Every structure is written in C-alpha cells, then in structure tokens.
Amino acid sequence: MSEFKPTLTEEDRAALRALYLALKNFTALRPTMPLQYVMTFCLVGMEEGAGVTEYAKTAEVSPTVMTRHLLDIGDRNRAREEGFGLVTQERDPTDLRRHHARVTPKGAAMTRRIKEALKTAPK
C-alpha cells in the first residue's frame, strides 16, 4: 500500500484554512451566501465612495447586476426586505443620480472578524 502524498504544500493548505475561516463569517449571516456578495463587499471595502458603475467595471459585471448585489448586501434588498446591512449607499449631493457606497458599522465589524480569522488561522 502506498502512502498518500498531498498535492498542496503545508503553506498552501494554511492559506486555504485562513480563507475558509474568513469566509465562515459570511456563512454565519446566510449559510448559502453567494460569492458575488462577498466579492462586492470586498470591492466596497477596498474602494469606499465609488459608484455602481465603477464597482461593476472592476467586477466585470453589468451595472444592473452590481446594483442588485449592492442592494442585497445593503440595508434593504431588491425585494425591499431586510438586507445584510454590510454596506450603505449615499446619494451624491452634487448629482442626485449617483450614489456612493460605504461600509456600515456592521460591515466594519465583519471586516475586523475577517482580519482576525486571517491572522489567527492555524498553520
């Protein structure tokens, strides 16, 4: 009988463990949290204050899709039900057609939990 040899290095597995622990924070909000919502949250956190068009371009999706994602992770989802509350959109006072997204206090707390999970992941 031959000994099983893993494909990945221990460093690779440690990186995946850290990512897994960080993502578990999102599944605590919803067990079937779509990856697109996680990525949208990350985009807003990395570049607060941008608008739908900028986020859509970065994510390589249509502005319509990005609008839905931002609504769903925001205060009220597209069905006008309670959203995840991770981001909020504020109307641009100089151009009422534009909105700027920012992370909410709940989103900031999520970010701290993710950061902690990435730091403390078992090696």
Image (cartoon, rainbow, N blue to C red):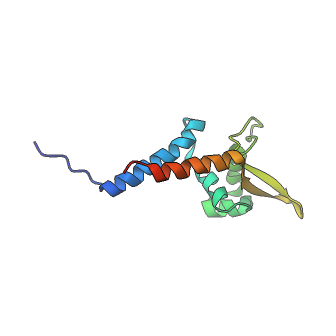
- Left or right of 54: which side holds 38? left
Where residue 97 sits, quadrant-wise, is: bottom right
- Left or right of 113: which side holds 67? right
Of the pair 78 and 110, the residue shown nearer to us: 110
**Callout count:** 0
Where residue 102 sits, quadrant-wise, is: bottom right
Residue 60 visible here: no
Residue at image position (63%, 61%) is 46
Residue at image position (41%, 51%) is 16
Of the pair 71 and 5, the residue shown nearer to us: 5
- Left or right of 103: which side holds 15? left
Above-or-below relation of 120 to 48: above
Q: Position of residue 78 (x, y in %)?
A: 74, 41
Q: Position of residue 25 (x, y in %)?
A: 55, 42
Residue at image position (78%, 37%) is 80
Q: Residue furthest left?
A: 1
Residue 53 visible here: yes
Above-or-below relation of 32 to 47: above
Q: Position of residue 54 (x, y in %)?
A: 70, 64
Above-or-below relation of 106 to 66: above
Q: Dividing the image into 4 quarters, which one contains the N terminus?
A: top left
Q: Position of residue 20 (x, y in %)?
A: 46, 46
